[in-house]
Amino acid sequence: MNETNEQKDKRTPTLWQTWMSVTASFFGVQSSKNRERDFKHGKAHHFIILGIIMTVVFIGTVVLAVKFALTQAGM
């Protein structure tokens, strides 16, 4: 059973596709094709959960980078 592109477009985005969409939104670069797919077939709670996770990881990375820089500066 081979799926056509039309059938693939009607499916809910995979975890990887959702992750890449959230990542693209962090940088502000999302193709209109993917954005359309996300709004038509994506589930909001998937994007919200991944967005929260990415935000926490980003903040944690910034905090660790600042602590490392301050340690290296002798503060």
Image: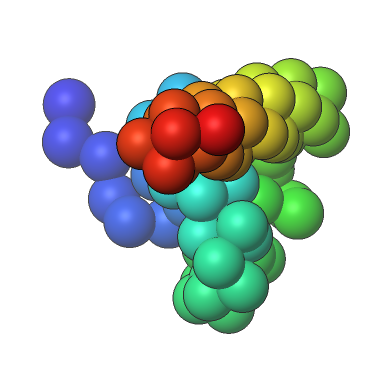
The answer to which image quadrant residue 41 occupies is top right
Q: Is residue 47 left or right of residue 7?
A: right
Q: Residue at x 61, y 57 (%)?
A: 26
Residue ranking furthest to the front: 74
Classify the position of the C terminus by image quarter: top right
Task: Name the foreground residue: 17 vs 11.
Answer: 17
What x and y, as percent, mark residue 23? 51, 50
Question: Residue 40 vs residue 11: left or right?
Answer: right
Q: Give the residue at x 75% y 27%.
A: 52
Query: Up-down: is 47 above or below 5?
Result: above
Which color scheme did the rendering employ for the protein? rainbow
Q: Say which residue appears at 17% left-offset and 26% top-offset.
A: 1
Regarding residue 7, the answer to whether it shows in the image is no
Residue 72 shows up from this direction: yes
Q: Position of residue 56 (x, y in %)?
A: 68, 25
The structure residue drawn at horizontal position 29% and vertical position 50%, both measured from the top left corner, is: 4
Residue 11 at x, y = what percent? 52, 36
